[in-house]
Amino acid sequence: MRKISDWFGIFVHIQIKITMSIVKTLGQYIIEKQADFPYAKGELSRLLRDIGIASKIVNREVNKAGLADILGEAGEINVQGESVKKLDVFANEQFIAALSVGGECCAIASEENEDIIIIDNEVSKNAKYVVAMDPLDGSSNIDVNVSVGTIFSIYRRTSLSGPGTKEDFFQRGTEQVAAGYVIYGSSCMLVYTTGKGVNGFTLDPSIGEFCLSHPNLQTPKLGAIYSVNQGNFVHFPEGVKQYIRYCQEEDKSTNRPYSLRYIGSGVADIHRNLINGGIYIYPPTLKSPRGKLRLLYECNPLAFIVEQAGGKATDGAKRIMELDTKELHQRTPLFLGSSDMVDLSGEYMKKYSEVKA
Ligand code: FDP
């Protein structure tokens, strides 16, 4: 007859086996996928791992954002005697620190910094990758407890050696080696692509690991959501106005009227539409003829992900990833999401291109 301790041992053994067979961590997945790149030496894998680590730290701080009153407002000294930083500044510092010690990245372009950050230490100065990032996208939403995100884009440098240069970033989106975003939402999720499909990992706080939760993400060809800041309607080009009217019309065969969903936090809006299907539009306006969003570290990485999931991304006419990058903080209009919806919005833009807003 078995003793209780024996049964307990068997139970634990089964539990471990079940856990091991179900959970695949980001680290395990990256190592497994390294074999897809025959000449890779593991640098890209380490870079993605470093981004994963920084995002866990940022997630921890985002979760404490509502405690600002207790811990201190940005710019003040908190009860522990530390100076309190704004979360976007904090996120920027965390990602720069993680990418600087890893030795895989020679330069960073960040939404938070006017110029590039050259990583000139011994381990990094000849590294072969550069990283463009928006460390905390949607940051105007932090104080009201709405999901925010980090967006990143990885390129192979074009300069041959030595410190990274600004020109290393002036590549088309089609040259991206990898791109992804982290959403700090009801759970924290990291979604990335290396050009072989899109995979999503959800942070399991009990083990502190991102676990594969959304393998091979595919976005529907047609959704029933449109996302745009409709408050700016009067400033939109006629093509966008007409497309919005189309979205609002009644037609059972195409499931219209569509629902308007606009959080105003880009990663959150785009993540929802990626999963459920839909279109996200940040159009040119009278005030900002080039739109608001940035090509290098917002539109290109999001376009890469959405295309890899079967969707599309344009500036209303041209494919986002084929636009020339001439400035670090260059802006572009963005029409991104389910392929049928992006195609149709492009047709409206073309049809009404002559009409003055
Ligand atoms: P934010 O300014 O809060 O950082 O890229 C910036 C961004 O947010 C996107 O995340 C968001 O989709 C968009 O701007 C919202 O802009 P509007 O407030 O003009 O709609």
Image (tube, rainbow, N blue to C red):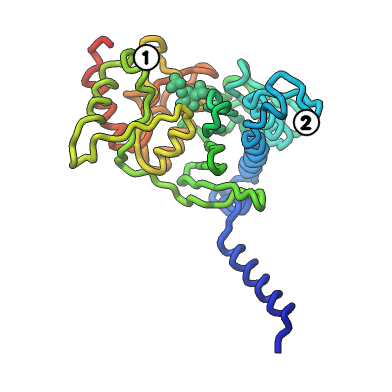
Instruction: Give the farthest residue toward the right.
Output: 81
Q: Report the residue that reaches farthest toward the front.
A: 70
Mark 2, Cα crowd under 10 Å, few <14 / some 14-19 / many 20+, is few
Which is nearer the N-term, disc 2 or disc 1?
A: 2
Please tell me the numbered disc located at residue 122. 2
Q: Is 316 situated left or right of 187 in this image? A: left
Between residues 336 and 264, which one lies in front from this camera angle?
Answer: 264
Question: Going 36% across and 19% down the picture, which residue do you hit?
Answer: 231
Residue 322: x, y in percent? Answer: 41, 27
Which label sits in the foreground, 2 or 1? 1
Q: Quadrant of residue 248?
A: top left
- Cα–Cα span, label 2 and label 1: 46 Å
User: What's under tag 2, amino acid-wise?
Assistant: Glu
Judged from the image, the secondary structure of the residue bearing numbered disc 1 is loop
Position of 304 relative to 320 (above/below) = below
* Tag of residue 285: 1
Q: Where is residue 294 shown, x and y percent of the image? A: 49, 22
Q: Residue at x 78, y 28 (%)?
A: 79
Residue 303 x, y percent position in the rendering: 43, 33
Q: Is mark 2 within 8 Å of ligand 1?
A: no
Side of 227 where 7 appears, left or right: right
How many labels were placed on the picture?
A: 2
Badge number at residue 331: none
Q: Residue at x 36, y 10 (%)?
A: 286
Seen in the picture, residue 267 relative to 282 is either above or below; the reply is below
**Which type of secondary structure does the marked residue at label 2 adopt?**
loop
Give, as a three-letter code, the residue at label 1.
Thr
